Image (cartoon, rainbow, N blue to C red):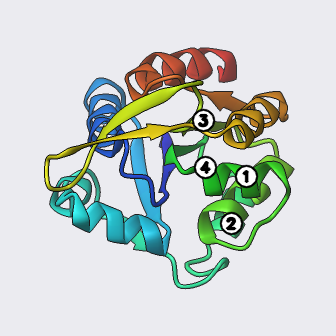
Amino acid sequence: MAKFAWAITGAGDYLKESVEAIREVLQSTDYKVMIFMSKAGEKVVNWYKLMEDVKALTSKVKVEIDPNTPFIPGVLQRRKYDFLVVMPATANSVAKIVHGIADTLVTNSVAQAQKTDVPIIIYPVDQKPGSIETVLPSGETLTLTNREVDLENVEKLRAMKGMILLSHPKELLSTILQLQEEMA
């Protein structure tokens, strides 16, 4: 059975679009998904009132207890999933990944997937120079300016082995279809 893991970090920016992208993949392919989220990811999914939408995608939704619990890193190491999707990824998670810090369930899962050549599809929210507008859970907009250090970390991430970066969640389906062709 074709399956992948989806990791949710504490990023609210493009979270709704990420849920929609995962739904599109599940409706357009034979893939099944196992979803896991960091503690911050769980908070943000609840703040944006998307937990029901997330749970509607699969019966397998897990929340971080510590960097190894639930034991998703080990399952990824044993290649029980075809690939790992991290979307949306916070600047903090990206920084940890590029500097080899594996102290959360998401960053540890990325590290272990990378060690066994499991492809990692990642959408870092802070990847374009300048300012962006994001929508808060209240519906208000907030303007944020991406920091140079975050942009540099995204470039380091782009250069890492096994990383496939998305510029928008809507690219997920085409990226997975291309990856599926390459794995065949």
Of callouts 2 and 4, which one flags the residue occurring earlier in the amino acid sequence?
A: 2
* Cα distance in 3D space between marks 2 and 3: 16 Å
Circles 1 and 4, Cβ within 8 Å, touching? The answer is yes
Q: Is residue 166 above or below residue 143?
A: above
Query: Residue at the spot x=56%, y=37% of the render?
Result: 146
Q: Nearer the viewer, mark 2 or mark 4?
A: 4
Q: Amino acid at mark 1?
A: Ala
Image spot of residue 93 (x, y percent): 64, 56
Which of disc 4 and disc 3 is earlier in sequence?
Answer: 4
Q: Label 4's element?
A: helix
How far apart marks 1 and 3 lie (CA) works out to 16 Å
Within 10 Å of disc 2 (Cα), the crowding (few <14, some 14-19, many 20+) is many
Q: Is residue 173 left or right of residue 128?
A: left
Eye-nearest disc, 3 or 4: 4
Q: CA distance from mark 2 to mark 1?
A: 19 Å
Q: Which of the 4 image quarters holds residue 85?
A: top right
| Label 2 to label 4: alpha-carbon separation | 21 Å
**x, y (%) of residue 59?**
28, 63
Q: Which residue is mark 3?
A: 121
- Look at the numbered disc 1 and give the secondary structure of its residue: helix
Q: Secondary structure at mark 3?
A: strand
Query: Percent from the top left, x then y, of residue 21?
Result: 33, 32
Q: Amino acid at mark 3?
A: Ile
Q: Which residue is mark 2?
A: 73
The vertical placement of 39 against 37, above or below, is below
Which callout, 2 or 3, points to the residue nearer the camera?
Answer: 3
Mark 2: amino acid = Pro
Q: Earlier in the sequence, mark 2 or mark 3?
A: 2
Q: Residues within 10 Å of mark 4 (few under 14, many from 20)?
A: many
Q: Under tag 2, what secondary structure? A: helix
Q: Mark 3 touching mark 4, by CB under 8 A?
A: no
C-alpha span from label 3 to label 4: 15 Å
